Amino acid sequence: MILHFWATWCPPCRAEFPKFAKFAATSAPGDPWVVVPLSIDDTAEPVGPYVAKLPGHFPVYWDAGGALANALGVSAVPTTIVLDKAGKVAWQSTGVADWSPAGVPSLVKSLSHE
């Protein structure tokens, strides 16, 4: 599972999110991962209009009050966390991640084979 914490008010998130969105939109049910984008915006209001401007369609979730982010120790956005099959943190990155095929997708594919 790929948890991606971001916010519409965060300049690095806004720069990264279109690349992440492209990856998320091309993920398919047969892939060995699930993509879960989690907005930590104060309200869910700005999230829908922001995501609607991007190509592709995928669900986006709102982490109301930052409950999940706090539980996982997320202290900055963007933050990407990859959970292994047992639900344990296998990899975590704070800051803009590499969503090219050789970046996070390659890492996730290698972890899914373990």
Image (spheres, rainbow, N blue to C red):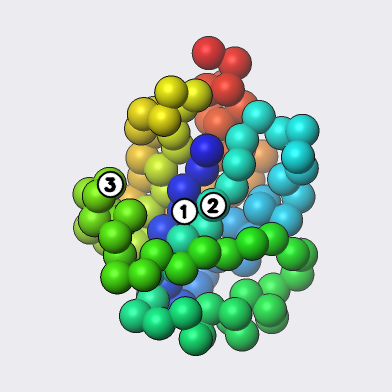
Mark 1 vs mark 2, CA separation in Å: 6 Å
Q: What amino acid is labelled 3 in the image?
A: Leu
Q: Nearer the viewer, mark 1 or mark 3?
A: 3
Picture residue at 34% right of the left edge, 62% below the top: 77
Image: 7 above or below 82? below
Mark 1 vs mark 3, CA separation in Å: 12 Å
Report the front residue among 23 and 46.
46
Circle 3 Cα neighbour tier, 10 Å, few/some/many (<14 / 14–19 / ≥20): few
Report the front residue among 62 and 4.
62
* Figure quadrant of residue 17: bottom right
Would you name the residue on which mark 1 appears?
A: 4
Would you name the residue on which mark 2 appears?
A: 36
Would you name the residue on which mark 3 appears?
A: 72
Asked if one can make out residue 70 in the rendered structure from this viewpoint, the answer is yes
C-beta proximity under 8 Å, tags 1 and 2: yes
Total numbered labels:
3
C-beta proximity under 8 Å, tags 3 and 2: no
Circle 1 Cα neighbour tier, 10 Å, few/some/many (<14 / 14–19 / ≥20): many
Image: 76 above or below 7? above
Mark 3 vs mark 2, CA separation in Å: 14 Å
